[in-house]
Image: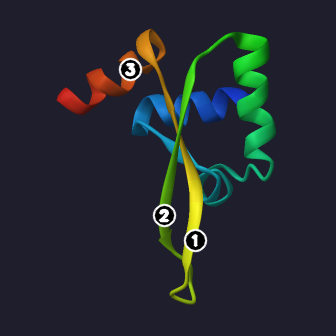
Amino acid sequence: MNTQKEQILDYMRRNGSITSLEAVACLGIIDMRKRISEIIAEDGIKITKTPETGKNRYGKSCRYIRYSLQGKDSGQAARDNTQ
C-alpha cells in the first residue's frame, strides 16, 4: 500500500497540482500540510505553494493553497498532459 506521501506525489504527477480539499475528497488525507512538509524536509522534493481564492459552499470568498511539483519531479504530469 502507498503511503500518504506517495499518494500525494502520485496525484500531483498525474494532475499537476493538489489542494487540501482535493486531498480529503480524492485521497482521504486530512493533514495535507503535514505530509507536504514531510515531502519537502525528508524527501528533498521541491514544491510550489500558490495562494488561490475561490468561493466556499455558501458563496463566500475563501483562500487556499495549491501545491505543485517543481522541476524534474513534475516531469510525469507534463508528459501525461501532452498525450
Q: Quadrant of residue 75?
A: top left
Q: Residue at left 77%, top 16%? A: 41
Mark 1 or mark 3: which is in front? 1
On the image, the x and y values in percent for residue 71 come to 42, 13
Numbered circle sitting on residue 76 = 3
The answer to which of marks 1 and 3 sits earlier in the sequence is: 1
On the image, the x and y values in percent for residue 48 come to 52, 30
Mark 3 or mark 2: which is in front? 2
At mark 2, the secondary structure is strand
Its colouring scheme is rainbow
The C terminus, quarter of image: top left
The reply, left or right, for residue 36 in relation to residue 60 is right
| C-alpha distance separating marks 3 and 2 | 27 Å
| C-alpha distance separating marks 1 and 3 | 30 Å
On the image, the x and y values in percent for residue 67 come to 55, 39
**On screen, 66 above or below 8?**
below
**Viewer-proximal residue, 2 or 69?**
69
List the residue tagged with mark 2: 53
Asked whether disc 1 touches disc 2, contact meaning CB atoms under 8 Å apart, the reply is yes
Q: Residue at left 48%, top 56%? A: 52
Residue type highlighted by circle 1: Cys
Residue type highlighted by circle 2: Thr
List the residue tagged with mark 1: 62
At mark 1, the secondary structure is strand
The reply, left or right, for residue 49 in relation to residue 77 is right
Numbered circle sitting on residue 52 = none
Neighbor class of circle 3 (other Cα within 10 Å; few <14, some 14-19, many 20+) is some
The answer to which of marks 3 and 2 sits earlier in the sequence is: 2
The N terminus, quarter of image: top right
Q: Quadrant of residue 7?
A: top right
- Please say whether residue 5 is visible from this viewpoint: yes
